[in-house]
Image (cartoon, helix red, strand yellow):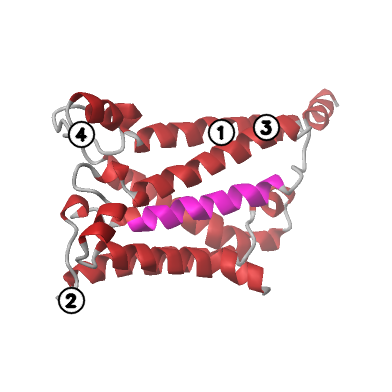
Amino acid sequence: MTVTEHIKFWALPFFASVILILMNYSGIAWMQYIISPPINREFGLLENLQLLIILMMFRAAVKASFFKSNGWEKLGFGLLAVFAMLVFLEEVDYGLHYIEYFTNGGVEDKERVRNFHNQGNNNFYVRQAVIGIIVFVFVLLPFVLIRFKNALIQYFAPNRKMALAVVVYLAVGQLARITPKLDVFVVNESLRGNHQEFEELVLYYIFWLYVVQLITRSFPYTWQGLMSKKSS
């Protein structure tokens, strides 16, 4: 692996996450404020880094949907752009916390339906679906299914080095859970019980890397090829 690959696949997400976690549980007021301010964690660095990566994914998908000549890729990246924007809107509560900032001093109205993923057990189901996708895309595809030499599998199978980013995702999740339990650290009350936000940051980074990787590839089928097969 090159130095650039080391940085991209594991060092950047790991050390950035460690710094953010240590800042959040440092007990130093200004550091905790940067990560997640008392008024609303949505205005903190952690949440906004997530939004930035989602927007990067959206931009990449939109750009690909325009410059790719293959109809399937145009459709696929166009749908991905729509999905990325939906995730972005879910993360910002469809703008509710911004509205509350200007109308209610930033106090969150707990009675309002803010998004889909935090209703009932939806967050649990979304998390299970994400775990399933990670196992399939970043483990089964590149290490098991790729042996079948299928064109679609070859296209969708990520670089095996992406597995390092998945390991970072798992490590950051554990670190974010263990750190607040240690006596030497102080819990940031505005982020209490939301340690999964740190692993979400790595998760979005992983999927951004994957999208960028897909953009560099050529889809193995075309609209014209499919139509000619049907006519024959």
Q: Nearer the viewer, mark 2 or mark 3?
A: 2
Residue span colored magenta: 198-215
| Residue annotated with mark 3 | 65
Give the secondary structure at mark 4. Answer: loop
- Name the residue at 74% across, 48% down: 217
- Name the residue at 26% across, 46% down: 41
Mark closest to the chain's N terminus, 2 or 4:
4
Q: Amino acid at mark 2?
A: Val
- Name the residue at 74% across, 58% down: 149
| Residue annotated with mark 1 | 81
Residue 158: quarter of image: bottom right
Mark closest to the chain's N terminus, 4 or 3:
3
| Residue annotated with mark 2 | 184
Residue 227 coordinates in the image, percent (x, y): 80, 25
Residue 33, visible in the rendered structure? yes
Q: Amino acid at mark 3?
A: Ser
